[in-house]
Amino acid sequence: MSKDQNSIGKSVVDLPANVTRSIFRNPLPTSDRGRAATSFTNFFLHIQPVRVSRQALRPSYTMGLGLISFFLFAILTATGVLLMFYYVPSTTQAYDRMLDLRSSVVFGVILRNMHRWAAHGMVACVFLHMCRVFFTGSYKPPREFNWVIGVCLFGLTLLSSFTGYLLPWDQLAFWAITVGTSIAGYAPLVGKAIKFILLGDATVGQEALLRFYVLHVVVLPLVLTIFVAVHFWRIRKDGGLAKPESEPAPKRVPVQVEIQDDPAPIMATGSIAVAAPARRFTIQGLVRGPLVKVGRLEEDTVFSWPNLLVAELFVLLLTIAGVMLVSFFFNAPLEQPVNVMHPPNPAKAPWYFLGLQEQVSYSAFWGGIGVPGIEVLLLLLLPYIDRGKEGVGRWFARQRIFANSIFLLFVIVNIYLIVIGTFFRGANWQFVSPF
Amino acid sequence: MVATSTEAKSTEPQVGRRRFLGWLTGLGIAGSAALGSLATFFFIRPRTTYGQPNRFKIGRSEGFPPGSRIAIDPKRVCIVREGNKVAAISTTCTHLGCIIAPSATGFQCPCHGSRFDVDGNVTGGPAPKALAWYAVTLTPSGELEVDKDNEIQTGTYLSV
């Protein structure tokens, strides 16, 4: 009896420690072995490598742009799910719900502001991230395909933003989508069909609102999440962020994995970076990875716990702070409710599409489909066209002056078109001076 | 796993059957994916639309006095009457689908500045082709009916 009481008493006393130990497999690390184990045994931390190069941690190298994009996506998901509780994708109710966010929903305004500004921020950061990757030559082998996934992610970001643009059902939304989907209609052969399927009708109306809603809240975020997961996974598998050539990139030697009872060896290419020549390991040895030293440790690296984690959390904090700050001082625009009879003059798309709209004002096919199509194709094929191996992992490397100049020209032209479309176009798309 | 692999090695015909089943499975999965994509395509392409009908009555011809150009924005059509002749010209811009408004010289688009003459021919801006003319008929009840599914040649009027 007393023994029972003792054991119950002991389990009560030990309860917090036992629960904690059952959740976290390692105590807070005090040794290198512990730091490695912490990265390795935590579900969320095991996405990261155990050690990370100092270069990858330098703010001046990456500017944290990819990470900021990801955190903005997280903020968009969180605020978007909350906004869904009050939103109705109906032409008769959607606009009223926007007004309700202002008048009757607690934190409605700040949530909508955060969602809107984070969306603008994400478009900007994803584009700047692409510029960073280009100017540091980080799309070179073995990272070609991750660049392609990145271009797809940029496209998905634009599509998400475009579909979300219709949902407030105000004048801005209606006419921007009318113009935007008409551009899709200019695509040869399939254009008309794409436009009809996208709108579910001949013109923008209830069917279009419902379709854009489903795309915006389910389909696109789901696809985007899958692409982000593959994007992150490949960073690891491609040996982390691109490093300058002075440090030899880790050789990716095929490792023969010996699985007991299976006579055929499995080739695991690039799954483990080994500087030493190929050796034979048992599967157990590979799983222990960071605890079993394979070859020499890479020079100029630090443990991810806590260096990488703290850096990431700091960027997260900065991102949240930035979005909150902008959302406190600037309200997301909401124009008059949709009036299908009276387009605003000029009818303008969101700023990141104004370059496209400016091009379209010269020629609908070439500005809306032809030139952008060629640009996207060139972006997708870029790592397979530019096969030079020089100047990887450094900003504006001298060896890459030709490629960098071309890309800089592409960036400047697009920014120039956006500035013209935003500030210098008035009624009937006439040239006006903002000054 | 261990047991089956050794078994497979010892009996030769089983390998063939297993490979055949493997191919069959692959074919089935690929077929399911293809059929599924096709079915999804047909599913999301609407068979009925809920918007306005493309054929509609616009009232008696007395409502449109000679020389008038009256735009019916909800129907996206402009009724032009010259003397005893009536025509319906589309007010959807051929550039990117904005609603254009009648102006002194014809029509003008607010979105990208396309301009058209009174017959809908392009006189400026990025619009790639002239505005569509739709068939106008007189119904037995004496009302005018516009059929937007029936595009007719520019300059074709209905005498009333």
Image: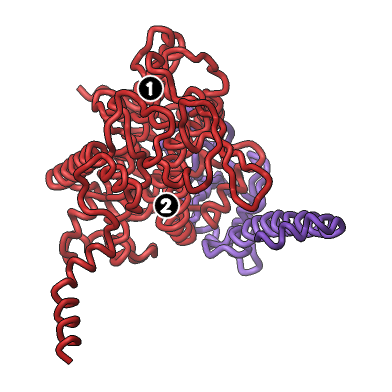
Chain colours: A red, B purple
The disc numbered 2 marks a residue on which chain?
A: A
Could you tell me if residue B24 is visible in this image?
Answer: no
The quarter of the rendered structure image containing the C terminus of chain A is: top left
Residue most toward the right?
A: B13
Observer-nearest of A129 and A295: A295
Observer-nearest of A43 and A234: A43
Residue at mark 2: A221
Q: Locate residue A386, reporting x and y percent.
A: 53, 17
The vertical placement of A420 against A101, above or below, is: above
Residue at mark 1: A243
Residue A273 - label:
none
**How far is disc 2 from disc 1 in space, using C-alphas?**
31 Å
- Viewer-nearest of labels 2 and 1? 1
Residue type, label 1: Lys
**Residue at x-position 44% and y-position 40%:** A231
Observer-nearest of A230 and A358: A230
Disc on the earlier residue, 2 or 1: 2
